[in-house]
Image: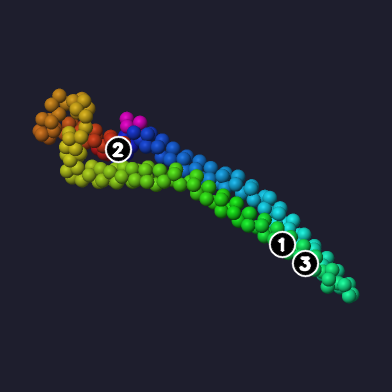
Amino acid sequence: MKIYADRFPTVCRQLLTDLLVLALVYATIRSALWVHDLVQKLAVPGRKLEGAGGGLADSLADAGGKVGRVPLVGEELTAPFTKAADAARTVAEAGRDQQELVGQLALALSIAVLVLPLALVLFGWLPLRLRWMRRAASTKALATAPAGRDLLALRALANQPLGKLARIAPDVAEAWRRGDDATVDALAALELRRLGLRTGR
């Protein structure tokens, strides 16, 4: 089988569709990544809050430890530092929670951007493409079979528009019944052209 030169528009249309689908998949993935990165920027305040709260908690705990070494009153002076350090840790924890929430939101929105276009590709374009590939393979096998040329010619008589059949011969059905080689070849080629294929004859 070879690509049939004068059926280039059919092959071109198939190639263009494939390229458009690839472009759609690429653009969808890029858009999902862009949305993810954009939403993740909302986590910046949470990171700053976590860093500030954690740093403040460490500083207060360190100061409390030093104050605690003061004789007699050290233990009493440590309590406010301990409470303040606990409050700072709570702030840091809130920052971590905010980052986690933003991460979940970024993932959910990215998936939402991906779902519809990829569903169209997987459940719309892909089954049609696989069906076309099966038809092309079966037609290729039929064309190489001993009686394949006659069967393709018969299929062309049954399926092709009358205008195309009339251009092959004035009484194309009669010519096919007689087994006219030129008519049979033309009919078989006409049927193969629907898939952009031809025999090697």
- Position of 48 with respect to 192 (left or right) is right
Which residue in the structure is indicated by mark 3? Answer: 82
The magenta-colored residue range is 5-9
**Closer to viewer: mark 2 or mark 1:** 1
The answer to if 6 sits in the magenta stretch is yes
Residue designated by label 1:
89
Identify which residue, 190 or 117, lies in the foreground: 117
CB contact under 8 Å: marks 2 and 1: no
Camera-nearest residue between 175 and 164:
164
x and y, in percent, of residue 144 in the image: 23, 44
Horizontal relation, residue 23 to residue 148: left or right = right
Instruction: Kindly identify the amino acid type of the residue bearing the numbered disc 2.
Output: Leu
Q: Which residue is mark 2?
A: 195
Q: What is the spatial separation of the Cα atoms under label 1 and label 3, in whole angstroms? A: 11 Å
Main secondary structure type of the part rendered in magenta: helix
Determine whether, in the image, residue 147 is placed left or right of residue 93. Answer: left
* Label 2, label 1: how far apart the Cα atoms are: 69 Å
Residue 81 vertical placement versus 192 (above, below)? below
